[in-house]
Amino acid sequence: MLAACGSSDSSTSAECVALDVDKLAQIAEGLTNEAAEVTAGVAVEVPEPDRAAGVAWAAAVVVDLDGDAETAILGLGDVAAVGVVLAADHVARALFTWGEATEDGSPAGDFRDWLVSSDPASAAASCL
């Protein structure tokens, strides 16, 4: 399912893709808390020249922690198939094991830091 989101200018709006239950289940495999559940998520494609570390999509997912919902930003290699998952923001890094070996200052670490404040990540979060 695609939904336009982002700015009101159609030339700069992003296409939000709702993540299906299989993709949410794959993402949930990296949760550090067994009681937590990934309940929803959307992704926005990262423009070709900005891609790195196998990440082509910025995703915002909702994680339910015993009734408290947290939004986490992740990088995804693919929205439909099993692939790269990179915990990007501080919430995702606290809740998931995905990308925990990524070192600050490394190329993947620099990309992760860029992704958190990128337009695709902001657009994905606004689509939730």
Image: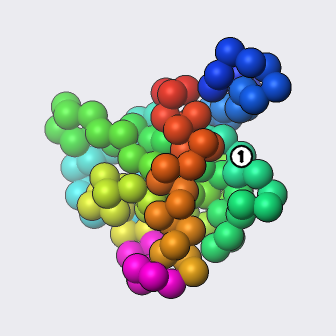
- Residue depicted at x 50% and y 65%: 112
**Dominant SS type (magenta):** loop
Residue found farthest to the top: 8
Q: How many marks?
A: 1
Disc 1 is placed on an element classified as strand
On the image, the x and y values in percent for residue 9 come to: 74, 18
Is 85 located above or below residue 108 in the figure?
above
- Residue depicted at x 22% and y 49%: 35
Is 20 located above or below residue 84 in the figure?
above
On the image, the x and y values in percent for residue 50 come to: 72, 60
Quarter of the image that includes the N terminus: top right
- Res. 24 in view: no
Q: Dot 1: within a 10 Å radius of its alpha carbon, few (fewer than 14), some, or many (20 or more) residues?
A: many
Where is mark 1, residue-wise?
45
On the image, the x and y values in percent for residue 20 come to: 61, 38
Is 74 located above or below residue 18 in the figure?
below
On the image, the x and y values in percent for residue 108 come to: 55, 76
Q: Is residue 103 magenta?
A: yes
- Res. 30 in view: yes
User: In which quadrant of the rendered view does residue 15 lie?
Assistant: top right
Q: Would residue 70 appear left or right of 126 to someone viewing this image?
A: left
- Residue depicted at x 82% and y 26%: 11
Q: Amino acid at mark 1?
A: Glu
Read off the magenta span. Answer: 99-106
